[in-house]
């Protein structure tokens, strides 16, 4: 077993069980974990994945089971953020000698970066298909958000469902990416990382503030104001649940649209016909809420930077721009609430990465990978992340590796 149980002091109500052997955990993250474990509605214990690091509200890389309440900041504002990967029948020899043209085509068909800074006019894969937006997308995502919008005018301000749908097929910024990878048999994969975009951010931000207002109204003192919660049975809890589930479906749909666009770019670059679904596609969240059954109870499970890993369930654990990534199969470890890490995890803040690494460092670390090599992506350079091999070793009782992927092309948001 690679798990250790960590108990700090009497103020900590629940144990903290960690899969972090051989992986450093900063003091600020440990304090956040203590704060979460002190909440009275935590069910059993808090599970900590090896990619754990400090995050807004709650640590990234934590699994928080609760009964009777939900903490919106523990979900965060990138609701439904996650991964999708698809293996093709292509092999490395089928790719063009230079991947620069393929990267340009992927950047063209998948809007990335700020896309007009979130203002009206943002481009998406469906920006010129109003019929699809008006008919296909609401059917696929569901229309519950309309009712939540109507009840919460501040949430709706500046947003319409049409504007939200314009973000479908867009990558976003930061650590979001699209990659072409090769596995251990040199098979070509397409893998991407993104979430619910601007509308998810708006939903998360709004309900985090509403939860804080409720804590002030009821004079609830917390070790961290960002742990403000919504009690189950309250109207706000029900509205948040509807909105967050909508955003999670939106995020999964966003990834599917981008995958279709990325495969289209690959077809344009490779004249050889190929099957784009040579293996079951994996489309999994790693920032989300799920209603599950653990240790004899129905509970709310918040995974912030963690992937569900039930027995036999496939998941994706990406490395950094210059490190390996993994398609994994869950072992259904009950103590982890059937979870595993969502990646390597940051070893330092974005600001520290920019201070510590030079452009030359980044160019050397991404040698042989067709990707951006400019100062604006230094905060995403491989050295800013933990050692993915150490992370994988620390969770050997959570997942088994099915495929090992290495990047040959990376598009960053």
Image (spheres, rainbow, N blue to C red):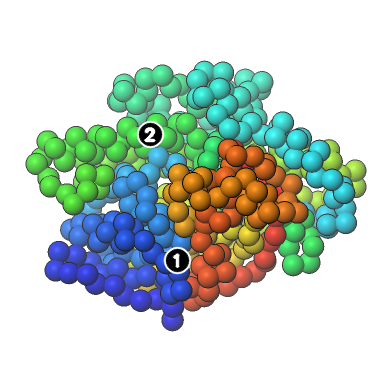
The residue where tag 1 is placed is: 50
Q: Check disc 2: other Cα within 10 Å, few if <14, some if 14-19, many if 20+.
A: many
Q: Give me the residue at 59% from left, 55% from top.
A: 382
Q: Quadrant of the C terminus?
A: top right
The circle on residue 281 is none
The circle on residue 203 is 2
Q: Check disc 1: other Cα within 10 Å, few if <14, some if 14-19, many if 20+.
A: many
Residue farthest to the bottom? Answer: 1
Horizontal side, residue 234 vs residue 29: left or right: left
Where's residue 135, x and y in %? 58, 26
Horizontal side, residue 246 vs residue 87: left or right: left
In the image, residue 285 above or below residue 245? below
Horizontal side, residue 145 vs residue 277: left or right: left
Residue 167, picture quadrant: top right
Of helix, strand and loop, which one carries label 2? helix
Horizontal side, residue 212 vs residue 144: left or right: left
Residue 73, picture quadrant: top left
Where's residue 63, x and y in %? 37, 60
Of helix, strand and loop, which one carries label 1? strand
Tally the marks: 2
Q: Is residue 217 visible?
A: yes
Q: Disc 1 versus disc 2: distance between alpha carbons?
A: 28 Å
Where's residue 44, x and y in %? 26, 67
């Amino acid at each position: 077993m690679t798990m250790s149980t960590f108990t700090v002091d009497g103020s900590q109500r629940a144990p903290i069980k960690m899969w972090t052997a051989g992986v450093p955990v900063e003091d600020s993250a440990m304090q956040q974990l203590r704060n979460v474990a002190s909440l009275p509605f935590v069910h059993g214990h808090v599970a900590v994945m090896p990619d754990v690091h400090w995050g807004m509200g709650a640590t990234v890389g934590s699994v928080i089971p609760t009964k009777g309440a939900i903490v919106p900041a523990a979900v965060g504002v990138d609701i439904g953020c996650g991964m999708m990967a698809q293996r093709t029948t292509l092999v490395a020899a089928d790719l063009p000698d230079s991947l620069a043209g393929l990267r340009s085509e992927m950047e063209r068909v998948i809007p990335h970066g700020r896309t007009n800074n979130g203002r009206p006019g943002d481009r998406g894969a469906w920006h010129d298909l109003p019929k699809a937006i008006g008919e296909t997308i609401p059917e696929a995502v569901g229309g519950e958000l309309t009712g939540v919008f109507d009840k919460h005018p501040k949430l709706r301000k500046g947003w319409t469902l049409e504007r939200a749908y314009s973000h479908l097929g867009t990558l976003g910024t930061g650590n979001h990416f699209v990659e072409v990878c090769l596995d251990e048999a040199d098979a070509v994969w397409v893998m991407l990382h993104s979430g619910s975009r601007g509308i998810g951010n708006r939903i998360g931000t709004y309900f985090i503030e509403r939860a804080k207002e409720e804590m002030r109204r009821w004079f609830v003192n917390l070790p961290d104001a960002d742990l403000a919660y919504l009690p189950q049975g309250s109207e706000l809890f029900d509205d948040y649940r509807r909105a967050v589930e909508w955003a999670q479906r939106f995020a999964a749909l966003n990834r599917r649209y981008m995958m279709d666009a990325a495969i289209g770019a690959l077809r344009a670059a490779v004249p050889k016909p190929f099957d784009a679904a040579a293996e079951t596609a994996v489309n999994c969240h790693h920032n989300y809420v799920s209603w599950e059954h653990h240790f004899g109870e129905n509970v709310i499970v918040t995974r912030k930077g963690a992937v569900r890993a039930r027995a036999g369930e496939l998941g994706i654990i990406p490395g950094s721009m210059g490190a390996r990534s993994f398609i994994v199969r869950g072992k259904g470890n009950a103590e982890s609430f059937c979870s595993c890490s969502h990646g390597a995890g940051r070893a330092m803040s974005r600001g520290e990465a920019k201070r510590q690494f030079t452009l030359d460092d980044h160019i050397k670390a991404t040698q042989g990978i067709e990707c951006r090599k400019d100062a604006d992506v230094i905060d995403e350079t491989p050295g800013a992340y933990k050692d993915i091999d150490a992370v994988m070793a620390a969770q050997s009782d959570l997942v088994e590796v099915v495929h090992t992927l290495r990047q040959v092309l990376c598009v960053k948001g």
